Amino acid sequence: MDTRADTSPDRTLEGLRVLALPSSGFAPEKHYIFQPLLAAKARWNWHIDILCSAKPPKEYDQLVAPSGRYFARPMMTEHEAWEDDPQAVAKVDQLIKEIEIASGIPTGQIVLAADSKIGRGFVAPVINLGRNVTSRIVERDNREPYRAARRLFRFADEMLEACAPDLVYSYEWAKPWLFTVWLAAHRRGIPCVVVRRSKLRSDHCYVTADRLMFNVAARGLAAAKRDAKAKVSDAAIEYIRAFREQPRMVNYVKAKWQEKAKNTWLNWHVSWARSTASSMLKTMVQPANVRRVVKAGRKLFDFNRKLVRARRQKRFFSVFSPTELAAMNYIYFPLHKETDLPVNFQATAWFDQQNTIRLLASVAPNGYRLLVREHRHNFGLRSSRYYRELAQLPNVVLVDAFDSQFKYIENADLIVTENGSSGWEGLLLGRRVLTLANTFFDGAGLARKLEKRDDLGGIIVQALSQPAVGDQSAHDRNLGYMVDAEFETAFDPSERNGALGGLQAALYPLLARRGAQASGLGRLAVDA
C-alpha cells in the first residue's frame, strides 16, 4: 500500500526522491537553498541526489548520505563519442523535438539564456565579457551552441532516467544545464521547483513551480485580496510608509554592491599578486600550470582596461539634481546588466536593450526626454561606440550608473521597465509605470502592461495624459495587498520551521494531486 497517498502534508512529502541542483558559486552552508533542503531531509526523510560540479563541496555529503548519488555537470563544448554515431544523434534530436513540442520552448531559448556561455553571439555586439575556451569554440562555429544543447539534453534525460526523482529542486532554471533538466523533466511529468530570494521581503525566500520563477502564489493571493477588498495589515502600511520616507535597495542587492565597494584598486592588485605568485611557484614544480600564469596576466589586463575605459566613457553620461529633474518632463528607462536573467530568461522578447531604447525613443511624445540609466555592472564593459550611437538618438540622455536611482524614479513622468525592481519602486512612490513583460509585482494590478508591441506609442501617450495616481487610498491598498501576499508566502531560509513551512505550503498542493498513483510522480503533468 502506498502510504504517501494519505492526504496529510507530512505523508505527502514523506520519503520523496529529490534531485537537487544547488549552486556551486556560493558557500553551500550560507546559500539560501541549502538549509531548507537539509531541514526537509531531516523532517521528511528525503532521498537526495545532487547535480553539481565535478568536485562537490564537502557540505553536500550530509544531503546525499546515506544512499544518494552525485552527478557531475557535463562539459558543454566537449565532443563526445556518441556524436559520431548518426543513429545516436538522431535519437537525441527526436528527444529534443518531443521536448520542444511538450513545452512549447525552442532550443534557441536555452542558448539565449546562456548568453555568457554558448550564446555569446547574442551579447558580443553590446558588451565585452572577455574570451575563454567556450567563447572561442562558439565564435568559430555558430552551430556549436546547438550541439552543446544536444549534449546537455542527452545528459539530462539519462540522469532523470537513472535517479527517477519525484521532485527536482533548484535555485534557478536559466543556466543551460539547469534549463535542459527542467525541460527534460517536464517531458517526463516530473514536478520542478525553485527557491528564490524575495525582492519585496528582504532576506526571505519563496518556493515556486513557475518556469519563469515568479512568486505566483503571492500574485494570486494579492489578486484575491483585491477582489475581497481585504484589510491591509499594519506591517504592509509600515512597509510603504518607510520606503517613501527612505527609499532603499533590496538587502541582498545592497550587500552585493557593498562587498564590491570593498574591493578597491589596491586590494584587488594585492590579491592578484599573491595569487599569481602562488601560480608561478606551482609552475616551477609543475610546468603544466603555466596556463594559470597566462590567465592571471590576461585578468590583470582586463581589470585595468575596464577602469580606463570607464573613465574615458564618463563624458557620455549626465548627472541631474532633484531640482533639475523636478523641472524636466522625462520617461525613465533603467537598464539591466547584460547577460541578466530577468531579461534573457524571463523577458526574452526584450533581451536586446539597445533595440528597446531605440523603440522608446521612436515613440517619445513631444516635450519628453528619455533618460536611460546604465547598470553598474555594465560600466567599463561596453564599447564607446555603443554609447555614442545611443547618445545620438533624438532626446535620449544617458544617466550615470553610480548616481542614485531613486531621485530619477521619484521625479519621472513615466517609468518603463521589462520587469525590473524600478517598476515596483515607482509604484511605491506614486509614479506611472509601464511594464513590457511579466513582473514580480503584477499582483498589485497597478502598472500598465504592454500586450502588443505595436501599441507602445499609444499606451505611452495615454499614460502620460492621465494622472499618475487617481485614487491614492485605493492605490496604497493595492500596494498593501501585494506586500501582504509576499509576506504570507515568503519565509526565512535560515529559520528551520519557517523553511519547512514554506516548502510544505508550496509542495503539498503540487504533490498531493498524485493521489493513489502506485508509481509515484512519474506520470504527474505539471503546468508550464
Image: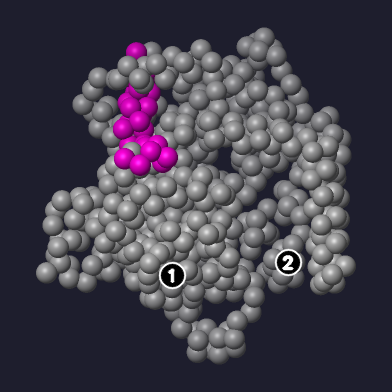
Residue visible at 65% across and 27% down in the picture: 370
Instruction: Mark 1 vs mark 2: give the one in front.
Output: 1
In magenta, the rendered stretch is 473-497
Whole-percent x, y for residue 333 in the image: 61, 31
- The answer to if 32 sits in the magenta stretch is no
In the rendered image, which residue does mark 2 sit on?
A: 133
Q: Quadrant of residue 215?
A: top left
Secondary structure, magenta segment, majority class: helix
Q: In the image, residue 343 lies at what x, y percent? A: 55, 46
Q: In which quadrant of the rendered image does the N terminus lie?
A: bottom left
Q: Is residue 414 above or below residue 74?
A: above
Is residue 455 left or right of 443 when viewed as pictured?
Answer: right
Q: Position of residue 263 (x, y in %)?
A: 74, 37
Residue located at (30% from left, 20% from top):
233
**Does the magenta portion include 494?**
yes
User: Which corner quadrant of the image does residue 290 belong to?
Assistant: bottom right
Which residue is located at x 74 percent, y 62 percent?
132
Q: Quadrant of the C terminus?
A: bottom left
Say which amino acid is labelled 1. Answer: Arg
| Sequence-first tag of 1 and 2 | 1
Secondary structure of the residue carrying numbered label 2: helix
Residue 430 spot, x, y in % from top left: 47, 18
Q: Residue at x 82, y 71 (%)?
A: 286
The coloring applied to the image is one colour
Can residue 210 be spotted in the picture? no
Q: Is residue 149 left or right of residue 362?
A: left
Measure the alpha-carbon separation of dots 1 and 2.
29 Å
Q: Within the image, what quadrant is residue 501 found in?
A: top left
Return the residue at label 1: 69
Would residue 337 be found to the left or right of residue 52 on screen?
right
